Image: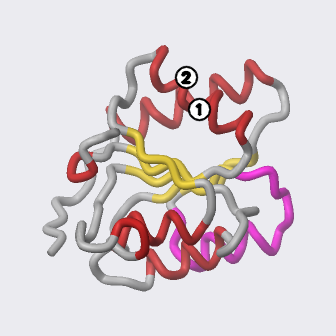
Amino acid sequence: MPDYAETEILLVEDNPTDLELALRVFKKHQLAYRIAVARDGEEALDFLFGTGAHAGRGIQIPKVILLDLKLPKIGGLEVLRRIKGDPRTRTIPIVVLTSSREEKDLMESYHLGVNSYIVKPVDFDQFSNCLKEIGMYWLLSNVPPKINAP
């Protein structure tokens, strides 16, 4: 179990195959050691805001959130809306990583403040390389603002 106060990536993904691949890629390339996983939108919000199963832990500020849009319980766009709508979490970088090529999803994501929108490649090797590049940029190159979560 990761040290949640030091979570590097919050991976919000309900597809078990994509989830397993992402975890293997990050481990193989030593990009992140502290990855929290949420398998639906509700779990992601509970993790970030310290509610539900995570009650009492307080706000969590990962270095980056990888967010699928097609999620059970609470959809990815609503998760994005809530994160970017809260002053405590709005500066967390969010990369939408989805199978949706719908223009309305793309436009709404950027309207809500997403930092990047990536359509998941279907090819295994391309998807693996995409994840590696995401990790290298957001965890090693990007300089995030200092956030003092309560």
CA gap between label 2 and label 1 equals: 5 Å
SS class, disc 1? helix
Q: Residue 9: image x %, image y %? A: 41, 45
Residues at marks 2 and 1 touching, judged by CB atoms closer than 8 Å: yes
Name the one closer to the observer, 35 or 127: 35
In the rendered image, residue 97 lying in the magenta stretch gets the answer: no
Which residue: 24% across, 66% down?
57
Name the one closer to the observer, 103 or 46: 46
Question: In the picture shown, does residue 34 fall above or below 63?
Answer: above
SS class, disc 2? helix
Q: Residue 79: image x %, image y %? A: 56, 73
Q: Which amino acid, by three-letter code, is at mark 1?
A: Ala
Q: Which residue is mark 2?
A: 25
Q: Which residue is mark 1?
A: 22
Determine which quarter of the picture holds residue 24.
top right
Pick the quarter of the image with the C terminus: bottom left
For label 1, the crowd category at 10 Å Cα-Cα, with few meaning under 14, some 14 to 19 and many 20 or more, is many
Q: Which amino acid, by three-letter code, is at mark 2?
A: Val
Q: Residue 126: image x %, image y %? A: 74, 24
What is the span of residues highlighted in magenta in the rendered image? Answer: 98-114
| Side of 83 where 103 appears, left or right | right
Which residue: 48% across, 26% down?
26
Residue extending furthest top? 28
Which residue: 42% across, 74% down?
52
Question: In the picture shown, does residue 88 fall above or below 118?
Answer: below
Which residue: 41% across, 67% down?
53
Protein image colouring: secondary structure
Pick the quarter of the image with the N terminus: top left
